[in-house]
Amino acid sequence: MSDAEDITLLLNRWADGDEGARDAVAPLIYDELKRIARNVFRRESARQTLQPTALVHEAYEKLVGVDVEWQDRGHFFALAARMMRRLLVNHANSRVAQKRGGGALRVTLNDAVHGAQDAEEDVLALDEALNRLSEQDARKATVLELHYFGGLTQPEIGDVLETSESTVRREFKLARIWLKKLMNDGDGAAL
């Protein structure tokens, strides 16, 4: 049985009230969250104020406390990506509110965001762009969210969304073009 099948089985048993399953799945989940956070922060500078470990701890704490019926491993990690996005956006909002500029959280997202002056503004601009994209095409927004905030690869995104890697690759390419256009021009009118 693969780790993915183990996680899905344990999540389902946990959802059915099996405390032993919760204890067994916890280290698997935590390891996966650490891997995702490493991917998210791979392009980070040394000046970041939020460390991957802190993000993992907070995301894990929130995920194990949520009352939801887990459909499968993909459902869990899609929720984890959304939660990490929320945590990064909340952290960026907090930092911007404290002071503009210096000592910033570094989430450069250099594949998508060019020219933003401040790391918090990068995160907030990406969040806003993903919200706008979601209004036009929720699937493309989810693909980007899973990549940028969940740190998932295209094959992993295909697994989560239960679609082929070629479909994910196509959706990702179109969504990035739209996102770059929006971030550079402020106009994301059409996909």
Image: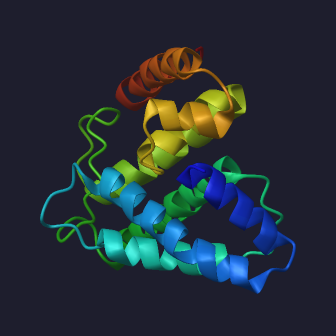
Q: Residue 184's spot in the image, x, y percent?
A: 35, 27
- The part of the image, by quadrant, that contains residue 93 is bottom left
Closest to the observer, 5 or 172: 5
Up the image or down, 113 lies above or below 79; here it is: above
Residue 153 seen anywhere in this rendered image of the structure: yes
Q: Residue 163's spot in the image, x, y percent?
A: 66, 25
Closest to the observer, 147 or 138: 147
Q: Residue 152's spot in the image, x, y percent?
A: 45, 43
Q: Residue at x 58, y 16 (%)?
A: 167
- The part of the image, by quadrant, that contains residue 25 is bottom right
Residue 94 seen anywhere in this rendered image of the structure: no
Q: Residue at x 66, y 35 (%)?
A: 161
Q: Is residue 101 left or right of residue 81?
A: left
Q: Residue 118's spot in the image, x, y percent?
A: 25, 54
Quadrant of the drawing holding the C terminus = top right
Colour scheme of the picture: rainbow
